Image: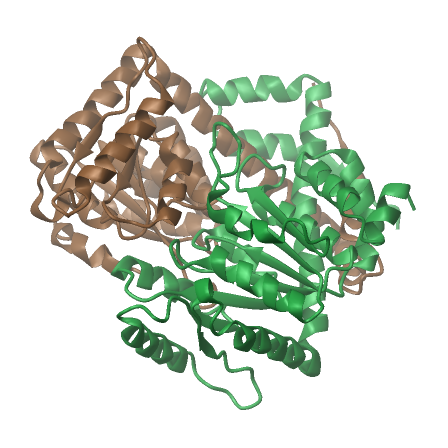
Chain colours: A green, B brown
Amino acid sequence: MSELAQRALEGHVASGARIIRWLEDGERAGIEALKELYPKSGRAHLVGITGPPGAGKSTLVDALIAENRSRGRRVAVVAIDPSSPFSGGAILGDRVRMQRHATDPDVFIRSMATRGQLGGLSRSTFEATAVLDAMGYDIVMVETVGVGQDELEVVDLAHTTLVVNVPGLGDDIQAIKAGILEVGDVFVLNKADRSGADDTERALLTMLHLRGVIEGVWAPPLLKTVAVREEGIPELVDACDAHRADLEASGALEGAAATRGEHFFAELLRDFAVEKIIASATARAFYPKLLESVRAREIDPYTAAEQLVSAFEPNFDD
Amino acid sequence: MSELAQRALEGHVASGARIIRWLEDGERAGIEALKELYPKSGRAHLVGITGPPGAGKSTLVDALIAENRSRGRRVAVVAIDPSSPFSGGAILGDRVRMQRHATDPDVFIRSMATRGQLGGLSRSTFEATAVLDAMGYDIVMVETVGVGQDELEVVDLAHTTLVVNVPGLGDDIQAIKAGILEVGDVFVLNKADRSGADDTERALLTMLHLRGVIEGVWAPPLLKTVAVREEGIPELVDACDAHRADLEASGALEGAAATRGEHFFAELLRDFAVEKIIASATARAFYPKLLESVRAREIDPYTAAEQLVSAFEPNFDD
């Protein structure tokens, strides 16, 4: 094992951070390190946190860090930020709220941009969580704005998904909530001291009821919090713990890990396949020529892609 | 040319709708039809509409349809809805607001789910717009909730991107707006009769000013609308027209079409490459075996993907 991977496994923060950065940048050394770390992952509790903008997710994550720390757990957070497509930088927004944990060596917080990564958001988030998992963090949280397809994939890959709601948002947001309602394991009504909280609570309970209650299957609870005052946070952490215990008891935790691996494999396969094809075809000056024809509309993109892929033949040994 | 593609080219709505549905379902016949239609596309004005939930985008689109119709234009709308990952159905939400146009044969409205499509949202949206373009619609609008990575890709692919804002949304939403601010060609402050409109207008103008004004380069205007009362809509359509004219004059329209083709080609290449690899490897019982090893964590996903891809060798004729 390389020294860097070894140090990351021992929980050395700077080593893990460097591997994650390499992975984001698509550097080969990051992939080599993750290959070494991957077999050591699989122990952390992966918690996805999603919900509409304005629901107070960052404040909630901040409170969850504090509560989990008070229970003696090491905590990592991957916060996915909508990013600027041109500058490539993440908008840190209210990440600053979590800064009080910056000096705690057992808390790791990392913002990821939703743009410009090799292989997309889902792959780089998976990679970061696998590294943090192998580094020995007990809880790895993934926070996302949660309305796009990629964001849904990210929360799908968590063991426990928290869906954060808030009183008094408009109809559009209700519609979005309906989209992520079905992936939620634990529901949170944050800012529960606001007017309109009772109406929203009733609406959410109705939606949860419509989802149906099945004997022996986890019934997602709804918890009320006021994250800025840390109200309801211990109960929320209890609910997350209970969901993890339920997954463990039912054997679903093992299945989830297998599914995560399969999903990741499929993504890598896409990336590696197209990388190889483009590299080979570029070396033969075939790719740039084809690309030029596509740009000039001399050939349609379907025919061009088919032509290129058809030039590759498998050569299996077994 | 197939009869179906021919009828779609003549603007026959049911034929076009069928091709779009086939494409969404990943049916081969859809691809064959689009291959025929693609060379006939490239005439429509592609307008992307994005902005945070609650900004009134659907109402605005409804008003834009009416105004464009009054100018004698045929209009198509692809509305991208956050969808339910389990049921696979799109949440139609307030699409109903556009129903007044349902009986107008020169208006085509289609909702697309953000889930479960072969090749992802970006590919299926591109495919739908290419079909509608070839069908002869003058304006093809793509409406999205616009915070995820896929949504940004979708608006990137439009000729003219409208970024819709609204007074009085929270800090989180401002952060999101900053992310899409740089892709906007025309900015809209909708619900401009609401309190706080002046503050939001000032904030937006500051952000636009920060973007900088360059001599001879399109300076994105900010227009105020009250979409429910159709106020400010003619001016907004004028601004979209002016942006298109600017693109045409600068030659950027041609470059945008080439970039759209290239982007689409790259996406298809990814999809086709992985399809071929999986099909070939499955036929040899190699893929299921490898997948099982990944699920059982006997092999890490990187090594597995590399193994599989390395079995493919190019065989270029040229």
Q: Which of A31 and B307 is in front in this view?
A: A31
Q: In this view, does B140 lie above or below A57?
A: above
Look at the image and tell me whether residue B83 can be seen.
yes
- What is the x, y in percent for residue B44? 27, 29
Residue occupying image coordinates x 46% and y 24%: B259
Give the residue furthest to the bottom.
A215
- What is the x, y in percent for residue A125? 62, 49
Look at the image and tell me whether residue B118 can be seen.
no
Query: So how many labels did they put on this image?
Result: 0
- Quarter of the image where one finds residue B96: bottom left
- Quarter of the image where one finds residue A286: top right
Q: Which of B49 and A83 is in front in this view?
A: A83
Residue occupying image coordinates x 47% and y 47%: A94
- Quarter of the image where one finds residue B276: top right
- What is the x, y in percent for residue A271? 66, 40
Q: Is residue A204 above or below residue B205?
A: below
Q: Nearer the viewer, residue A208 or A18?
A: A18
Residue occupying image coordinates x 12% and y 36%: B233
Q: Which of A178 and A314 is in front in this view?
A: A178
Residue occupying image coordinates x 52% and y 71%: A233
- What is the x, y in percent for residue A209? 39, 82
Q: Is residue B263 above or below residue B231?
A: above
